[in-house]
Amino acid sequence: MPNQLKKFRWLNSTVLGIGLASLFSDWSHEIATTVLPAFLATMGAAAAAWLGIIEGVADGLSSSAKMASGFYTDKLQCRKPIAVIGYLVTALGTASFGLATSAWHVLLARSAAWLGRGVRTPIRKALLAAAVTKETYGRAFGFERMLDTVGAIVGPVTALLLVTAFAHNYRHVFLVTLIPGLLAAGVIAFLVKEKARKPVAHISFGERLRLMPKPYRKFLVAVGVFGAGDFAPTLLILLATQKLTPDFGAAKAASIAVGFYVMRNVFYAAFAPVAGWLADRFKKQFVLASGYGLAAVMTWLIIFVPMNVWLLGVVFLLGGIYVAIEETLEDSFCAELVDEEHHGMAFGVLATVNGLGDFLSSILVGVLWTAFGTTTAFGYSAALFTIGALLVLRT
């Protein structure tokens, strides 16, 4: 029994609290994400282009907040209250989708929500890394990713039930997102225990960045290249809907696409702990490169293989597995490469690089799709996924 307790010493109240916060917050915004394409369609918006712009601009704004938050909060003794505020802003911003009457209103609401998300992200990751040992980073981050993705599974299912219950009144659906969003802020406030820490000395951002280890900077380049092709999952939902509409009709195709998205998230949740286990036992750059490689395989399939319901299922399955590896390994590898006192800065820069990549990829894939079709749009992503896999191997 003592050995078993020692084995699971990483699963403490802070790890659990952060995991539950991720679950509730993802539950909230995944409800909104699931119905967002249909909601935009009721406004007469060009779905692919607007989805790309909304996701891209929001991610770009979020990336600035992540950078500032990571740099600033390393200089504080107590960072948890800022994380609570970030969760509250995200909850309120997501619920305010229901007030939108045009696509640009959704853009503003999503940007506000993702601003809060950006502020809290490096703090949450630093709190999680500080709560466990270096030998268990992979398992702790894998556990957090698993619970985050449970929210991503429950969210779309909840969205479908709410759409039926509210007779396709999307504004009421967005209002319900406030409940899990507020619960996320609550568990951070009451379950997470912040360890006493010594703030870092006040030096410039550029000097702090130059002090980061060289392997970390090389890692950021690989993450940035991969992220520049890593488009929002809403575009996969749109792809499945369009491909299946001729055979199943628009309504059934949309339902199947959401079902695939739920399946993607099931595989994500199931594989995140596996990715964490692998991260603690093998070289992290090799495991991460395999995840990037799976993303490339997924996009090459979209380009070269005619899509039917079965192949779309394979695409979403691969999507779930590669994201589980990508997100678990990027965080745990980052924590390993940088000393603990600089974790806020390290996670902030990492999240910013990812956010800037998402900004480019979501906008470019959406616009390329609208202008030139799916082959060009996903070909762009496939090339960057492949290059990113090769670069991370050289970290």
Image: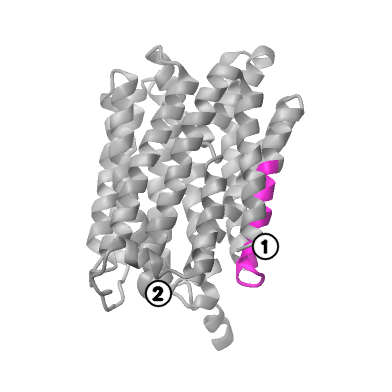
Q: Any magenta on residue 282? A: yes
How far across and how far down the image is residue 38, in percent?
A: 45, 21
Q: Nearer the viewer, residue 387 or 194?
A: 387
Left or right: where 255 falls relative to 349:
right
Q: Is residue 335 above or below residue 121?
A: below
Left or right: where 390 falls relative to 118:
right
Which amino acid, by three-letter code, is at mark 1?
Phe
Q: Residue at x 43, y 45 (%)?
A: 355
Q: Nearer the viewer, residue 121 or 60?
A: 60
How far across and how far down the image is residue 197, in percent?
A: 29, 78
Q: Quadrant of residue 120?
A: bottom left
The quadrant of the rendering that contains the C terminus is bottom right
Q: Which mark is drawn over residue 340? A: 2
Q: Any magenta on residue 104? A: no
Left or right: where 161 falls relative to 14:
right
Q: Quadrant of residue 103?
A: top left
How far across and how far down the image is residue 295, in percent?
A: 65, 44
Magenta stretch bounds? 278-296
Looking at the rendered structure, the secondary structure element under dot 1 is helix
Q: Main secondary structure of the magenta part?
A: helix
Q: CA distance from mark 1 to mark 2?
A: 23 Å
| Residue labelled with disc 1 | 286
Q: Residue at x 45, y 75 (%)?
A: 132
Visible residue check, residue 210: yes
Which amino acid, by three-letter code, is at mark 2?
Glu
